[in-house]
Image (spheres, helix red, strand yellow):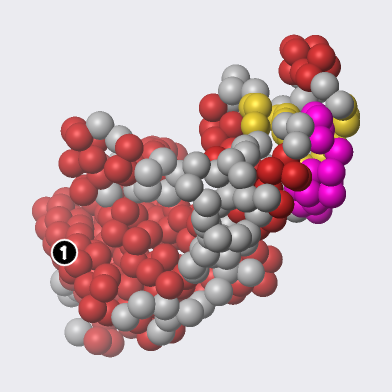
Amino acid sequence: MIRRTLAIAIKEVLHLRRDPRTALTLLGMPVVLLFVFGFALSFDVQHIRLLVVDRDGSRAAREVTEAFLQSGSFDLIAHARDDRALNSLFDNGRAQAALLIPADYGRDLASRRPTSLQFVLDGSDAQMATKILAYARQIVASVTVGPPVPGAGAGWFPQPRVWYNPELSSARFLVPGLVAFILMITSVIATALSVVREKERGTMDSLRATPLFAPELLLGKTLPYLVLASVSAAGSLALAWALFEVPLRGSLGWLTVVTVLFLLGGLGQGLFVSTVAESQQVAFQLGLLSTMLPTLLLSGFIFPISSMPTALQWLTRLIPARYFLVALREIVLKGVGFEVWWPQALALLLYATLALALGTLRTVRSL
């Protein structure tokens, strides 16, 4: 059995040597996607156009203004002593935010009397406005550190502490999701195309005439792609560390186990797709349709699952990338152990078992 399986695996490797475009696509597509999505898809907001209305002119007011400018997120477009320019700058889109410092702000702050800062936002883009407001709160909190004063208003915030991602970099949140997205697409499409290719070329009938059992055929054809997908996963994580400073705080061994479980499920799904499609073009389209949209929209990669309607939250339980993404972030960003993310590993094991069983049974029936 082992010899026959290895013979099919060697045959598949020889095909990859004769058709290097397939191997380059499977290895190169993750790199390209990681570059494009990693740099283009970002929740970080930079170069926010800021108007400062300083009615106080004190040293405390200047410190708050400097803190905004030195943060690297805000660009000062105007500095005024009153708010007459506020409406015009927001109306023509020159200003996205405005910091209003009241008169006697520095004196009230020094004497520990109640005081506050006003922050005006352009809310036409709600997501950006929410992010800008979070930046502003963090900056003010870093400047006005001190013991809380009852009724002191926005001039006094507790000093925030951010764990696991102190810089609040969206890349560290998005890149693990990109890895899951890339691996899901490559594992499913690679397996589906390898089996459908035999149908298109008519070599499946020749394989039926051999003493091969169906599981041996499937294992031999999927084993090279499991190795190729594993190399792609290692390369994607290495690029994530090199380009986006995504750390690996957890166990490399556990990360390997979770990744292999996820890839096995993807290979099983690819086998199932190959039993439905009769051409490589159809297999490619079905592979993309069954992986790209669910992983992007329903895995928690971009949109939080907790904010989805209840029906969609239940539907996300059928998306394997949801569990892989949680386990990946727990291991890579938090460095926690198996006792925390074992439910995700169990779900991935169940998914891999069902996908491989269903794909194998369908393929055996078609043979």
**Total numbered circles:** 1
Q: What amino acid is at disc 1?
A: Leu
For disc 1, the marked residue is 350
- The magenta region covers 51-70
Residue 361 occupies quadrant: bottom left
| Residue 306 place in picture, x, y as percent | 30, 43
85 over 337 or under it: above or below: above
Q: Is residue 241 magenta?
A: no
Residue at horizontal 83 percent and vertical 17 percent from the top? 85
Q: Nearer the viewer, residue 117 or 128?
A: 117
* 219 left or right of 227 in image: left
Asked whether residue 66 is drawn in magenta, I would say yes
Q: Nearer the viewer, residue 13 or 318?
A: 318
Within 10 Å of the Cα at label 1, are there few (<14), some (14-19), or many (20+) other Cα atoms?
some
Choose between 52 and 302: the one closer to the eye: 52
Place residue 56 in its image quadrant: top right
Residue 247 visible: yes
Image position of 42 with respect to 143: above or below: above
Residue drawn at the location 19% of the way across and 33% of the way down: 311
Quadrant for the N terminus in the image: bottom left
Q: Residue at x 75, y 45 (%)?
A: 106
The secondary structure that dominates the magenta segment is helix
Q: Position of residue 114 (x, y in %)?
A: 58, 41
Secondary structure of the residue carrying numbered label 1: helix
Residue at 50% x, 42% y: name it: 151
